[in-house]
Amino acid sequence: MELSDLRIFQAIAEEGSISGAAERLDYVQSNVTARLRKLEDEVGVLLFYRKPKGVQITEKGALFRKYVDSILQMADESIKILQDHGKASGSLKIGVVETVTCGNFMNLIASYQSRYEQVSLSLETGNPLELMEKVKNFELDAAFVTGELTKTNLVTDYLLTDEIVLLSGRTLDVSALIDQKWAVSPRGCPFRMKLEQWLKDEGVALKNFIEISSLETILSSVKAGLTSTILPKSVLKGPYEDLNVYPIPEAYRFIETGLIRRREKYLDYAYKAFADLVNEEGL
């Protein structure tokens, strides 16, 4: 049994098909099929049920996958240890919620890239729950997320507290919450949860709202006077600097943003350099 066979198994499990794994690994599909059969012969059990469209992992295959993921993680970490000579290199995958990108984030990224040109940096946006799951599942090295961070089993390497404000493109009576039309992100967004809790405590149900996935579109709808929303003050940049800003009750006014990662014994230099720069320059 070779590591390359385990990587093929892992890719098939993650992609849900042999063809998807072959494309991802840049292998010929027949080769992937043959290697999977060889692996199943070695372990003596069927790892995947073959279906007309893709595969389904078996119960034994799911158990095997836990060990494969652990073995490959240890193998990758050992390679990093041997290759890490105090120089940042390789790849670094960072997740980020959109609200973080409105501040100093892109300047931070530019600074990192200019200092560590040998690092291949990739950025992925998403909501906090999605990004935390991807960090846990080794799809991301780390992520900037907002919300309640102390209850996770992840490590926080940087933390800041941001002020949330009510934003509107027109003058409004904050006390008349029931009359507002709101722009909110899909469920899982901490700002939506703050708004829902605020309205609930005021005896108002969140019914009159538009659900929007894009931060830019939310801000545009607010600027046009179509909706109001609650977001961090840091989004008030460029064309949105002139939005009407209103304070919200202190119980809902503050939110944490942190750089989170898995709890690991070894951190490669590319990530350590990134975390140090974040703490040095801030968001």
Image (tube, rainbow, N blue to C red):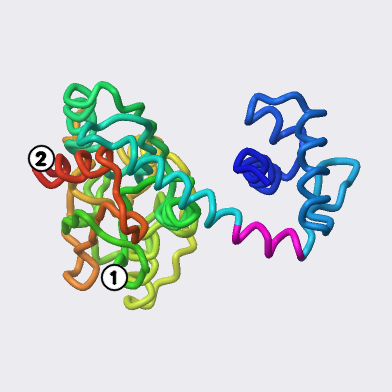
Labels 2 and 1 touching (C-beta < 8 A): no
Quadrant where the image shows the C terminus:
top left
Q: First in sequence, mark 2 or 1: give its number.
A: 1
- Distance Cα–Cα, label 2 vs label 1: 23 Å
Range shown magenta = 60-67
Residue 94, percent from left and from top: 36, 41
Q: Main secondary structure of the magenta part?
A: helix
Residue 100, percent from left and from top: 27, 43
Quarter residue 223 falls in: top left
Which residue, given by chain and number where applicable, does mark 1 sit on?
A: 150
- Is the residue 129 above or below the residue 91 in the image? below
Q: Is 200 included in the stretch rendered in magenta?
A: no
Q: Is 65 included in the stretch rendered in magenta?
A: yes
- Is the residue 80 above or below the residue 129 in the image? above
- Residue 225 located left or right of residue 126: left
| Front residue of this view, candidates 129 and 228 | 129
| Front residue of this view, candidates 189 and 226 | 189
Residue at x-position 17% and y-position 25%: 115
Name the residue type under label 1: Thr
| Front residue of this view, candidates 221 and 280 | 280
Residue at x-position 62% and y-position 38%: 4
Residue at x-position 23% and y-position 31%: 109
Q: Is there any visible trace of residue 56 in the rendered image? A: no
Q: Is there any visible trace of residue 274 in the rendered image? A: yes
- Is the residue 10 above or below the residue 178 in the image? above
**Label 1's element?**
loop
- Residue 206 located left or right of residue 161: right
**Label 2's element?**
helix
Which residue, given by chain and number where applicable, does mark 2 sit on?
A: 281
- Is the residue 276 above or below the residue 106 in the image? below
Instruction: Characterize the local packing of mark 2: few (<14), some (14-19) or many (20 or more) Cα atoms within 10 angstroms.
Output: few
Residue at x-position 40% and y-position 54%: 128
